[in-house]
Image: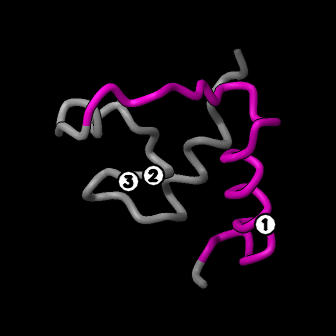
Amino acid sequence: MHAPKGLHAFLRAYYHTNSANWKPNNPFHLTSRSASEFARLPAYYVMEFDKNMTVTVARRCHEPRK
């Protein structure tokens, strides 16, 4: 609701960076339900404690493409 570029831009970036069309995404299977495996999850599943959703999405949008 307080996204710097507006809610529309935030949602567009959020869904695009979580899609298969986003080149930096690298899907993988977890080998167990352990903390170490969950730590491998991308930030859009488990955000950093001190970052909100807007900051997380903005950072992903600026990641270099692979």
Q: Amino acid at mark 3?
A: Met
Q: What residue would you read off at disc 2?
A: 45
* Pair 2/3: label in front: 2
Query: For the point 80% across and 74% down, which residue is it?
Result: 8
The segment highlighted magenta reads: 3-32
- Rate crowding at label 1 as few (under 14), some (14 to 19) or many (20 or more) other CA atoms within 10 Å: few
Residue 40 versus residue 32: which sits nearer the camera?
32
Query: For the point 58% across and 28% down, which residue is it?
Result: 27
Q: Amino acid at mark 2?
A: Tyr
Query: For the point 67% across and 23% down, which residue is it?
Result: 64
- Rate crowding at label 2 as few (under 14), some (14 to 19) or many (20 or more) other CA atoms within 10 Å: few
Query: For the point 76% across and 37% down, which residue is it?
Result: 20
Mark 2 lies on a secondary structure that is loop
**Disc with the residue nearer the chain's start (3 vs 1):** 1
In the rendered image, the quadrant that contains the C terminus is top right
Residue 10 located within the stretch drawn in magenta: yes
Give the quarter of the image for residue 23. Answer: top right
Real-space Cα separation, disc 3 to disc 1, in angstroms? 19 Å
Q: Amino acid at mark 1?
A: Ala
Q: Position of residue 43 (x, y in %)?
A: 44, 45
Rendered view: 57 above or below 34? below
Rendered view: 16 above or below 21? below
Q: What residue would you read off at disc 3?
A: 47
Q: What residue would you read off at disc 1?
A: 9
Left/right of residue 9 with respect to residue 34 in the rendered view: right
Residue 8 versus residue 4: which sits nearer the camera?
8
